[in-house]
């Protein structure tokens, strides 16, 4: 006889699931025991269910295979929520299996009882509580197929006394229909888009992760249109390297060239992107959008022609209809601006930069000693990291430094909480990536605030031999919040963090811990960290006064920084005591 739990686990194994993440608990004991007996799936027990959900979501984003996490009754299920929301907003297929109180106690306010179907209503495309053995395999099939179709989150709740029950004889094994069709725009829409593009004298492309699988088609289109290409952060992977048209990112992490590209264009061509910041897009510019999801077309900026379809297939149909634009003035001017900005950025990683007169004046004004520049740390990691490394970044300044100083060349991959914007994602996402292949290098750009939020799961890296490289930008601040306050003209308040020696904490847990406070030690320390076997925590004390100005800075922003600095200066150390 086959039990409920055994069929669920066998079905997931047949689907290609190789790890399940979570925290064990009484209601889920039949599930975890079925994992033990099946032998194809590795159980990875985390210290917090949120870390489990982030890890499962990371695996789904990297492989396209269903990520799976477990949370037992009540609090265990609740703890999954933040990581599951990240999976939803990242369009990652994830199945959460949650425990529940015994069937007879449902609705009785039993110990730890919550209504899982209500709890997960917003985050999950599918959520259902199993109440009978006769509902299998149908409910499992529905859950998995819903997760792939969204793609997003599905939640299957299993009461504690149901998982170990035998299924009726003759119950079929689960059969999953998970292939997604390739879509192509209507002929009339293609003709309209071609007409608009051909009529424009200059075109700027905004390219997102939906075009990562269309690199040859995107580059061919940029060449035909002589168009600069602004990349979203998620499009760095696969589209940044060896691309003579790209001019970096826009938004808060962007650069002046992206603004030039938008401002000088007669037409904006958006490909595979749901770029979520309308204020950074050009106003009043003719816009064509290519997007696989119809609901995404026109929701960030008005669109004159929307093409619903897969990026590669659509571009293969559209590009032959377009007249080549031989005037490269728009492309060349934007690329010149971009390379000039890149040169200025490279000067920031020069070890002698802060020893200049200007550097000494700035250090005096900021009331700080010479400290390690986060730009220098990011640039060194870019130099040392493997060409096939997987990078994860915490939300905030860690993402800024990666965006500007780490190139996604070779077969490098990139993950982050780029839609939800959660803290504490980089380390658990790195664990998920590393578990897929313990021989592949995985590098997490961690903020000190983010790392310490889920610090307990450093133990997971040690317990399961996950050799992640955790690079901590230890500036003693919630850096992005500090930037936001100062941009608004507010004094920094509530952002300072009292941190331990994080390298020492890492060593106590069982990682290799390396702490750097001297800029002269940075190069050697980074190389030591990347050469060390096993999980490593590189704790680099960086300058909290480093800022990254966005490409579109107003006089009000500048005034805000000035006023904020004056206000901060009016509070002396003695006033804080």
Image (cartoon, rainbow, N blue to C red):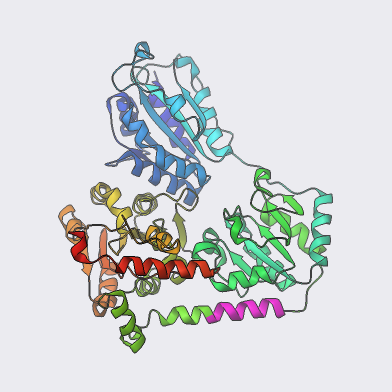
Q: Is residue 395 above or below residue 140?
A: below
Q: Is residue 334 magenta?
A: yes
Left or right: 11 as drawn, with respect to 439: right
Residue 351 visible (yes or no)? no
**What residue is at 29 percent from the left and 48 percent from the top?**
454
Q: Would you say the magenta stretch is mainly helix, strand or loop? A: helix
Question: How many circles with numbers are drawn on the protein?
Answer: 0
Q: Position of residue 261 (x, y in %)?
A: 64, 71
**What residue is at 15 percent from the left and 55 percent from the top?**
508
Q: Quadrant of residue 350?
A: bottom left
Q: Position of residue 347 (x, y in %)?
A: 42, 82
Residue toward you, 12 or 470: 470
* On-image quarter of the N terminus: top left
Q: Position of residue 416 (x, y in %)?
A: 44, 54
Left or right: 261 as drawn, with respect to 105: right
Q: Position of residue 402 (x, y in %)?
A: 43, 66
Residue 245 visible (yes or no)? yes
Residue ranking furthest to the top: 104
Q: Quadrant of residue 468?
A: bottom left
Q: Is residue 231 above or below residue 106?
A: below
Q: Quadrant of residue 207?
A: bottom right
**What residue is at 35 percent from the left and 41 percent from the top?**
50
* On-image quarter of the C terminus: bottom left
Residue toward you, 136 or 210: 210
Q: Is residue 334 above or below residue 295?
A: below
Residue ranking furthest to the bottom: 357
Q: Which residues are magenta?
A: 329-340
Q: Is residue 416 magenta?
A: no
């Amino acid at each position: 006889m086959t039990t409920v739990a055994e069929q669920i686990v066998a079905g997931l194994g047949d689907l290609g699931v190789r790890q399940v993440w979570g925290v064990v608990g009484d209601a889920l004991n039949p599930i975890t025991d079925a994992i033990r007996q099946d032998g194809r799936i590795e159980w990875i027990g985390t210290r917090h269910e949120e870390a489990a959900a982030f890890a499962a979501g990371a695996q789904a984003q990297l492989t396209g295979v269903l990520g799976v996490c477990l949370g037992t009754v009540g609090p265990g299920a609740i703890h999954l929520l933040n990581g599951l929301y990240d999976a939803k907003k990242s369009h990652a297929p994830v199945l959460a299996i949650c425990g529940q109180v015994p069937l007879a106690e449902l609705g009785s306010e039993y110990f730890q009882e919550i209504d899982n179907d209500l709890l997960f209503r917003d985050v999950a495309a599918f959520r259902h509580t199993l109440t009978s053995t006769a509902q299998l395999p149908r409910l499992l099939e529905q859950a998995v197929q819903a997760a792939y179709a969204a793609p997003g989150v599905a939640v299957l709740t299993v009461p504690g006394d149901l998982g170990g029950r035998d299924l009726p004889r003759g119950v079929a094994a689960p059969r999953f229909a998970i292939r997604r069709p390739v879509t192509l725009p209507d002929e009339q829409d293609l003709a309209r888009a071609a007409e608009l593009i051909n009529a424009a004298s200059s075109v700027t492309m905004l390219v997102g992760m939906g075009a990562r699988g269309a690199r040859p088609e995107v580059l061919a289109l940029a060449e035909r249109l002589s168009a600069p290409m602004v990349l979203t952060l998620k499009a760095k992977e696969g589209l940044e390297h060896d691309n003579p048209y790209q001019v970096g990112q826009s938004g808060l992490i962007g650069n002046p060239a992206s603004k030039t590209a938008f401002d000088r264009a007669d037409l904006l061509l958006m490909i595979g992107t749901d770029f979520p910041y309308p204020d950074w897009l050009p106003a009043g510019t003719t816009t064509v959008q290519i997007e696989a999801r119809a609901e995404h077309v026109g929701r960030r900026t008005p669109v004159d022609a929307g093409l619903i379809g897969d990026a590669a297939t659509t571009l293969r149909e559209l590009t032959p209809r377009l007249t080549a634009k031989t005037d490269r003035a728009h492309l060349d001017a934007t690329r010149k601006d971009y390379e000039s900005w890149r040169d200025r950025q490279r000067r920031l990683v020069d070890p002698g930069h802060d020893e200049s007169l200007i550097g000494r004046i700035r250090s005096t004004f900021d009331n700080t000693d010479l400290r390690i520049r986060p730009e220098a740390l990011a640039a060194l990691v870019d130099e040392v990291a493997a060409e096939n490394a997987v990078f994860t970044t915490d939300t905030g300044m860690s993402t800024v430094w990666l965006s500007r100083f780490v190139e996604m060349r070779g077969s490098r991959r990139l993950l982050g909480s780029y839609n939800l914007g959660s803290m504490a994602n980089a380390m658990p996402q790195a664990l998920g990536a590393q578990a897929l292949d313990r021989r592949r290098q995985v590098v997490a750009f961690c903020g000190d605030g983010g790392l310490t939020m889920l610090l307990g799961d450093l133990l997971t890296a040690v317990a399961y031999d996950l050799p992640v490289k955790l690079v901590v930008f230890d500036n003693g601040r919630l850096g992005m919040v500090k930037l936001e306050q100062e941009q608004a003209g507010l004094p920094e308040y509530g952002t300072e963090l009292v941190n331990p020696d994080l390298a020492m904490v890492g060593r106590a847990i069982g990682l290799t811990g390396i702490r750097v406070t001297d800029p002269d030690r940075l190069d050697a320390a980074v190389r030591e960290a990347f050469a060390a076997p096993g999980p490593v925590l590189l704790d680099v004390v960086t300058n909290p006064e480093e800022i990254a100005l966005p490409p579109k800075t107003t006089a009000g922003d500048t005034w805000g920084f000035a006023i904020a600095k004056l206000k901060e200066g009016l509070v002396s150390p003695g006033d804080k005591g």
